[in-house]
Image (cartoon, rainbow, N blue to C red):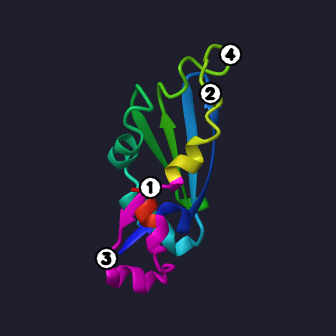
Amino acid sequence: MKVQLVDLAHARSGDKGDTANVGVIALKPEWYELLTQSVTVERVAEHFRGMIEGDVERFELPNLNALNFLLHGALDGGGTLSLKTDAQGKVYSTALLRMIIDVPDADAARLGLPAANSSRVAKSR
């Protein structure tokens, strides 16, 4: 089953110099493990390919059912230097929530995941 991250989590983002900081929080505690398995450094780096110039770091916050990502080289120098429209990195959270993950049907049923909105998933590809 293909699921868009927005159906499993909410997110916030901001800046620290040239680094965007993106927090992803599971909507239900039982969905956190799925996030840790599916939203990897490699997947996030690929998702933002062409938008960031540096590495991606991931930090797990199991007590909050959350992941935190640092996207280095994402802000073209940061808020006071950048000519980017979003120099504070506020839209990176929305952009990450557009990521599509594959979940085995049995796991989706066991976790009670919402049915995939096929038209939204198809549009985001």
Rendered image quadrant of residue 9: bottom right
Q: Earlier in the sequence, mark 3 or mark 2?
A: 2
Residue tagged 2: 16
- Mark nearer the viewer, 4 or 2: 4
Q: Earlier in the sequence, mark 4 or mark 2?
A: 2
Q: Which residues are magenta?
A: 97-120
Task: Look at the picture and state if 26 lies above or below 15.
Answer: below
Percent x, y of residue 99 = 44, 55
Q: Earlier in the sequence, mark 3 or mark 1?
A: 1
- Amino acid carrying mark 4 in the image: Thr
| Residue 8 visible in image | no
The CA span between labels 1 and 4 is 29 Å
Q: Residues within 10 Å of mark 1 (few under 14, many from 20)?
A: some
Residue at image x 49%, y 55%?
A: 98
The CA span between labels 3 and 4 is 45 Å
The CA span between labels 3 and 1 is 16 Å
Residue at image x 58%, y 47%?
A: 93
Rendered image quadrant of residue 38: bottom left
- Amino acid carrying mark 3 in the image: Pro
Query: Which labelled disc corresponds to residue 104?
Result: 3
Contact between labelled residues 1 and 3, with CB atoms less than 8 Å apart: no
The CA span between labels 4 and 2 is 11 Å
Query: Which part of the image, by quadrant, shows the N terminus?
Result: bottom left
Residue tagged 1: 99
- Amino acid carrying mark 2 in the image: Lys
Name the side, left or right, on which 76 lies relative to 3.
right
Q: Secondary structure at mark 4?
A: loop
Percent x, y of residue 30 = 51, 75
- Amino acid carrying mark 1 in the image: Met
Residue tagged 4: 80
